[in-house]
């Protein structure tokens, strides 16, 4: 399970370190695309294939916007020997990544956030909201 939070910097070439713990679970190659809340979502090869299959199985009229949103921005990521991955300019721009980033595990996915946006997002979620959702789904 992908879990934990890791703060890193983006270098001048647009590379970030993907935590070793995440690389072990994601594999030698993984896939990144636009995510919800202006972050980057990272999938394992199996997760990416399953996600893509679900979108492609939708009726064309419903799927076209999803296909354009996710597939046009998707990139294959292959870590170098230092564990760094190159994020495309399109993904960096979409997620507002400048310098400080937060790489988080969300169970089956990894998300890459601009640190300031991540901190703002966390400050807006209250414990009572989380408990309400947990109660709703009997967690």
Image (cartoon, rainbow, N blue to C red):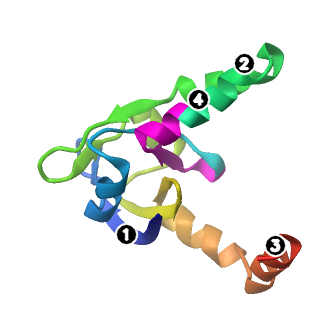
Q: Earlier in the sequence, mark 2 or mark 1?
A: 1
Residue under circle 1? 6
Query: Between tags 1 and 3, which lies in front?
Result: 3
* Vertical order, 47 against 73 (above or below): below
Taking the image as drawn, is residue 23 in sight?
yes
Q: Between residue 123 and residue 65, name the one nearer to us.
A: 65
CB-based contact (under 8 Å), mark 4 and mark 2: no
x then y, percent, for residue 63: 74, 22
Q: Secondary structure at mark 3?
A: helix
Query: Between tags 4 and 1, which lies in front?
Result: 4
Q: Earlier in the sequence, mark 4 or mark 2?
A: 4
Residue under circle 3? 133
Q: Secondary structure at mark 1?
A: strand
Taking the image as drawn, is residue 32 in sight?
no
Q: Earlier in the sequence, mark 4 or mark 1?
A: 1
Residue under circle 2? 64
Q: Earlier in the sequence, mark 4 or mark 3?
A: 4
Q: CA distance from mark 2 to mark 3?
A: 31 Å
Q: CA distance from mark 1 to mark 3?
A: 25 Å
Q: CA distance from mark 4 to mark 1?
A: 27 Å
Q: CA distance from mark 4 to mark 3?
A: 27 Å
Q: CA distance from mark 4 to mark 2?
A: 12 Å
Query: Between tags 4 and 2, which lies in front?
Result: 4
Q: Is residue 65 magenta?
A: no
CB-based contact (under 8 Å), mark 1 and mark 3: no
Q: Residues within 10 Å of mark 3 (few under 14, many from 20)?
A: few
Query: Between tags 2 and 3, which lies in front?
Result: 3
Q: Which residues make up the magenta segment?
A: 37-49
Residue under circle 4? 52
Q: Earlier in the sequence, mark 2 or mark 3?
A: 2
Q: Secondary structure at mark 2?
A: helix
């Amino acid at each position: 399970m992908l879990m934990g939070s890791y703060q890193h910097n983006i270098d001048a070439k647009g590379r970030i370190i993907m935590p070793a713990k995440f690389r072990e679970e994601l594999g030698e190659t993984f896939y990144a695309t636009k995510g919800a809340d202006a972050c980057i979502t990272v999938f394992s090869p199996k997760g990416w294939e399953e996600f893509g299959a679900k979108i492609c199985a939708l009726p064309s009229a419903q799927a076209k916007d999803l296909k354009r949103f996710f597939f046009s921005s998707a990139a294959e990521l292959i870590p170098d020997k230092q564990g760094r991955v190159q994020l495309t300019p399109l993904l960096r721009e979409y997620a507002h990544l400048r310098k400080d980033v937060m790489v988080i595990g969300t169970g089956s996915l990894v998300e890459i956030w601009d640190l300031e946006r991540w901190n703002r997002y966390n400050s807006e979620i209250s414990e009572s909201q989380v408990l309400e959702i947990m109660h709703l789904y009997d967690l």
